[in-house]
Amino acid sequence: MSQLEQDAQDEAATAAYAAIADFDEADRRTELASAIEIIYRLPDPQLRSMTEARLRAWLALPPEKAAIVGNSFESVMDAGPADIAMRRVTVVQSVAFKLTPEEIAQLRNVVPRVLGDAPPPTASMSEGTGAPPPPWWAFWRKRN
């Protein structure tokens, strides 16, 4: 699936997650654990496209199915290895910039932890137009 064009990948992911949502919880977690292990070992460009396909699939599914599979996905990730969890955070945050604020709100409504604890992305975050951080050596300066 990771070799497909993004639109085809999105469609394939939607079909796969729709099917997985119909599994019982134990089978769903087993299937997701296997997929997570494979997907999170892919090179970064393929991992990003697969992550985008997953998020777009959850947006395309009926909310109740997206919540079922998304929350099972989160449970599997919670029990997974730290290296996969670390990759996930950076990849999901980078893919989130491709989503509209409405899509992000929809994802968070269905799967609250889908984007982690980070604030919603803003234009200034993606364009680097926000205020620059203070110099590292000014850590002792009192902030108002």
Image (cartoon, rainbow, N blue to C red):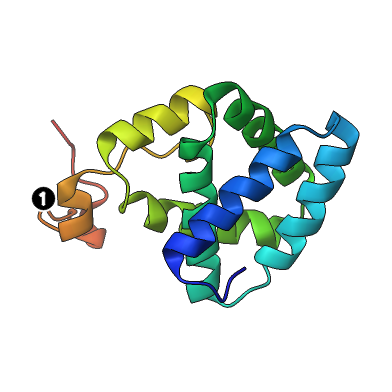
Q: Is residue 67 above or below residue 133?
A: above
Q: Residues within 10 Å of mark 1 (few under 14, many from 20)?
A: few
1 displayed left or right of 36: left
User: Which residue is drawn at the image coordinates 45% and 29% (left, top)?
Assistant: 108
Q: Nearer the viewer, residue 57 or 30?
A: 57
User: Which residue is drawn at the image coordinates 50% and 55% (left, top)?
Assistant: 10
Q: Does residue 75 appear in the picture of this structure?
A: no
- Looking at the image, how many numbered discs can be counted on the residues? 1
Q: Is residue 37 above or below residue 123?
A: below
User: Which residue is drawn at the image coordinates 24% and 60% (left, top)?
Assistant: 137
Q: Nearer the viewer, residue 56 or 42?
A: 56
Q: Nearer the viewer, residue 41 or 85?
A: 41
14 displayed left or right of 132: right
Q: Position of residue 16 (x, y in %)?
A: 67, 49
11 displayed left or right of 83: left
Q: Quadrant of residue 67?
A: top right
Instruction: Please state which amino acid type lies under the numbered disc 1.
Output: Ala
Q: Say what secondary structure mark 1 lies in.
A: loop
Q: Position of residue 52 (x, y in %)?
A: 46, 55
Q: Position of residue 65 (x, y in %)?
A: 63, 28
Which quadrant does the C terminus fall into? Answer: top left
Q: Which residue is mark 1?
A: 131
Which quadrant does the N terminus fall into? Answer: bottom right
Q: Does residue 87 appear in the picture of this structure?
A: yes
User: Which residue is drawn at the image coordinates 74% and 66% (left, top)?
Assistant: 38
95 displayed left or right of 113: left
